[in-house]
Image: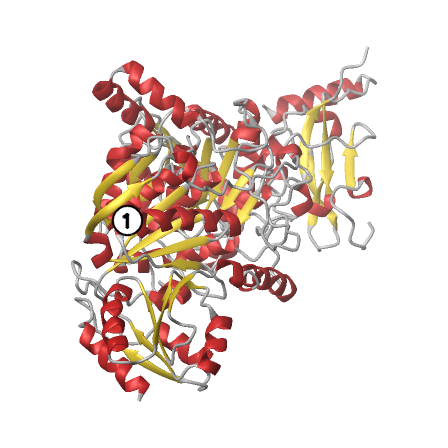
Amino acid sequence: MSSTLSKETSDSATETHGDTEAVQNPVERFLRTKRMPHIWCPGCGIGTTVNCFARAIQQCGVDLDKLSIVSGIGCTGRVAGYLDLDSFHTTHGRPIPFATGLKLANPELKVVVYSGDGDLIAIGGNHFIHAARRNADITVICVNNFNYAMTGGQAGPTTPLDAVGTTAPYGVCERPFNLPFLAESCGAVYVARWTTYHVRQITKAMVEAIDKKGFSFVEIIAPCPTLYERRNRLGTGLDRMKWFKENSVIRNGVDTRYCDIGFQQEIVCGKFVDIDRPSLLEMTEAKMVDLLSKRRWEEIAKRQQKPLGGVHTKE
Amino acid sequence: MDNQAAASTITNKQTAGEPRKARGRVSIIVERCKGCAYCVEFCPLGVLVMSPDFNSKGYHYPTVIHAEKCSGCDLCGMYCPDFAICGSRQPTKE
Amino acid sequence: MSGNGSGALVGAHYLDGDHAAAEGAISAGCNFVAGYPITPSTEVVERLAGRFPNTGGKFIQMEDEIASSIAIQGAVWGGAKAMTVSSGPGISLMMEHIGLAAMTEVPCVIINVQRGGPSTGLPTLPAQADMMQARWGSHGDYEIIALSPNSPQECFNLVIHAFNLSEQYRVPVLFMMDESVGHMTERVVIPPQDEVEVVPRRFTKLPPGEYRPFETDEDLVPEMTKAGEGHRIHITGLTHDEQGYPVMNAKCQDKLVKRLVDKIRKNAGEISLYHEDGVNDADVVVMTYGITSRVAMRAIREARKAGIKVGHLRLVVVWPFPEKYVRRLARRIEAFVVPEINLGQVVLEVERCTAGKCETVPVQHAGGTVHDPRAIYDAIVEAAR
């Protein structure tokens, strides 16, 4: 085995079995391969979720030129940099309002927010609840690794009670959020939770969430072997994944109030909410049609659809 | 998949003198691997094992130990956080 | 969404500054506003909420100013021409995102209808105490453009100019009104659309693969695009290269941040805008901006009657500060008199630029009302001595 650094895509670094030519990973075309390897730690669950996401966007057949990904700050926030899509790496806690503006300006876009527990729920909590309330037509994928990983493993609003973090060295004294419950109570139309063990289910949930009109939310419990697992003596990433396999229980449709996560307690997974209600844009349009008359509104809507410009604008 | 049943099937065929052609194949980009071993653990057919060798960053990477068992299901690829491995079906030959 | 100012209320109206600013945005082709209520700026968004459906724009009241200031940036990347509106406490909340807009070069307008501060201060009364914040409020090195209208008509005209500057330089532009100008009602003439000069956004014509979102030539301003064009852009607030990808080192920082700053500094001559009256043979120059300029006119008139050769230099573009001109003037005149409704902000720039070559006389005011013209008159007389 050569001890020199070899480029990721060169054949000499690729082992193939069963055939002599290297097979291109079908996920490659969704990645900014020049930016590989990514910054995530060995065993980090984020990469697994991105794998699922790539498969999901392949399956749902969305036009990749029209898919925009918005992330915040944190380890999960780096996802935007690695996907070969229009990607926006915004400020801490604020991908959701950015996404709301983006989608309102161009409703033809499919907008996915991809960020972490601290970013979306602590500093971004206010935006989360309002976007769900409004039923903004965006998909929010929240990778929950129970801490602020990028900054070194501080406790956050999803860290289980009694678990430790660098800012809670004696153990967390606050009850964490139950994210599916929070999302449902604020009006999300699609709510699901899986762990990174459930790769097939994550992919399916992402497909459903992306196709869903309105505010769809997918929580993915992921290992953070370098920080959360290490500080709480929960083993390696692999130990954690095996733990997810043994200790998660699938309860589709269960009342989300029973989805609390205690420290090293079972994790309830499944699709909990899948309802229909008009999105933000639909509500606005319905009001205008009500007030003005359909024909008058269509005249106005035509003006709204006329875009500001761009290379591929169809006049 | 029941590993035991698959193993015994292969063993039977092997003792009968016919090598079984694998339905799938695995591609590994060694330099991307960070040695998490998810692929090894979650391969339903026991195709992979962690190699005693390591890449230039010092990580042990997976290597195929039972190529003939591979079904090309790509579960290894789905789990891999580093896009370092993928499974695919062998192209069918006439 | 329509960007051609359709639905403009052509004609003469009797409007206050807030309403005029809203109409200016409409005439400029603004089609996305995200805002949050805060006195004395609320009327701007209230008017837009009512007018927008008709003009082809979208308005959303966000949950706070932080959300508003980034929702407009999302909208710009979706192709919209966007603006937000606030006052002191809300502008303070928006500071991080003003930095983001400067760093990612997002053209947008942020209206600050200044009120008494600090903190909750005097919500219904005027001040001009956010001028330094407009320039330095966000962290790090960056430059913005800030304008200061002194009448409802200027609120209309200069909002259009603000949008034009934002598109030309791909930079956030702060529109520094104040409660006096915002709530005074005067005649505002809205011209027909063909008489309104609107600088279009410089969308790139380069295909995907060739286009780089932060690559520039000598003018230091990159071409723009929007999501959905196939360019697969990456936009980040991290220090980035021409492609937009984060590069975490001093070399990239030097290249990027210097360009962001030079983009405005090197073009300061073009961007600068001021009105002069009697400056050419003046011994004393009164430098003003915003509502104070109108109060100062009275003082200047009286001072001239008293035989003092006093000129009036009214800044319309306050940032970038007209450094070169002020330095030149300082060599010729006796003194600058700088009345502002704050305890000394723009006067600090004057002091810096005059470098002692002439006197600088501040006329401070803690806020809550406009100056008594006598205070400015006394300062002129003192300066002329």
Front residue (pair A16, C126): C126
The local secondary structure at tag 1 comes to loop
Q: Amino acid at mark 1?
A: Asp
Identify the image quadrant of residue A214.
Answer: top left
Lateral position of residue A200 relative to residue C252, left or right: left
Of the 4 image quadrants, the one containing the C terminus of chain C is bottom left
Q: In this rendering, is residue A248 above or below A149?
A: above
Identify the image quadrant of residue B14.
Answer: top right
As drawn, the residue found furthest toward the bottom would be C385
Residue at the (29%, 18%) spot, across then down: A296
Lateral position of residue A144 relative to residue B18, left or right: left
Dot 1, crowdedness within 10 Å: few (<14), some or many (≥20)? some
**Type of colouring:** secondary structure
Front residue (pair C147, A84): C147
Q: In this rendering, is residue A166 above or below C377?
A: above
Whether residue C147 can be seen here: yes
Identify the image quadrant of residue C370.
Answer: bottom left
Residue C70 location (% of width, % of height): 39, 47
Front residue (pair C288, C82): C288
Front residue (pair A240, C135): C135
Residue C16 location (% of width, % of height): 21, 48
**Residue at image mark 1:** C64
Whether residue C39 can be seen here: no
Residue C55 location (% of width, % of height): 33, 31
Of the 4 image quadrants, the one containing the N terminus of chain C is top left
Lateral position of residue C6 relative to residue A108, left or right: left
Q: Chain of mark 1?
A: C
Residue A153 location (% of width, % of height): 45, 58
